[in-house]
Amino acid sequence: MLIAYFWTENEIEEELMQWSDLAPSVGELIPGTNQPILKVEMYQGESETVCLAISNPTYGEGEHTFHVQLNEQKNVITYGMSMIGKPPVGRLMNYETTGHPTLMRPVPSRWVVDLIETCQPVAGGSYKAVYLCYCVEAPLSIAA
């Protein structure tokens, strides 16, 4: 199962993703921190289980979903939250800063979403769903 740990340290939201055979319990410490787990949520897909171990009082809301992009070896490429409740599709994008304080420039990555597994909350949860997005490497061709 994929375990996603969420906590706040020095007013900064932190995350840790790792694979494990055992789910953590409420009261255990998040690995490498002194943050206790306040809530554990389970999300079940067709072939995978996702566990959210949360130290923050609240995380996602309503129609929000969480998505994790994985490579062929199930290593995490990236992850994020969707406020519109949809997983990423097609080529993943990276973003780089511009001269503007809030404007970002999209830059295509070498990863393309190939398959999406939807994991639904087992007994209520912070997110409507967790999407595991399996990606394949598809580098962009270099312009001549």
Image: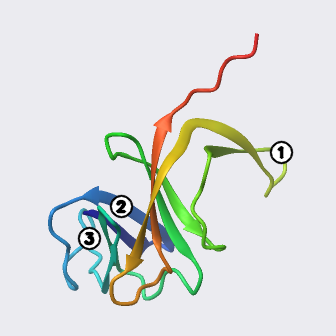
Mark sitting earlier along the chain (2/3): 2
Please tell me which residue is depicted at 20% across the width and 74% down the height of the picture.
24
Residue identified by numbered label 1: 99
Sequence-wise, the earlier of marks 3 and 1 is: 3
Q: Real-space Cα distance between discs 2 and 3? A: 9 Å
97 to the left or right of 28: right
Corner quadrant of residue 44:
bottom left
Residue behind mark 3: 30
Asked if 119 appears above or below 144 in the picture, the reply is: below
**Mark 3: amino acid:** Ile
Q: Residue furthest right?
A: 100
Residue 120: % across, % down: 41, 77
Q: Looking at the picture, does residue 109 appear above or below residue 36?
A: above
Tag 2–tag 3 contact (CB < 8 Å)? yes
- In the rendering, at what x and y percent does residue 66 appear? 50, 69
Q: Of the residues shown, which amino acid type is indicated by label 1? A: Gly
Instruction: Residue at 64%, 74% (x, y): give it.
Output: 83
For badge 2, the amino acid type reads Leu
Q: Which residue is mark 2?
A: 16
Residue 61 in which image quadrant: bottom right
Q: Secondary structure at mark 1?
A: loop
Nearer the observer, 26 or 68: 68
Nearer the observer: mark 1 or 2; the answer is 2
Which of 116 and 16 lies nearest the eye of the viewer?
Answer: 116
Q: Is residue 27 left or right of residue 3?
A: left
Which comes before the other along the chain, label 1 or label 2?
A: 2
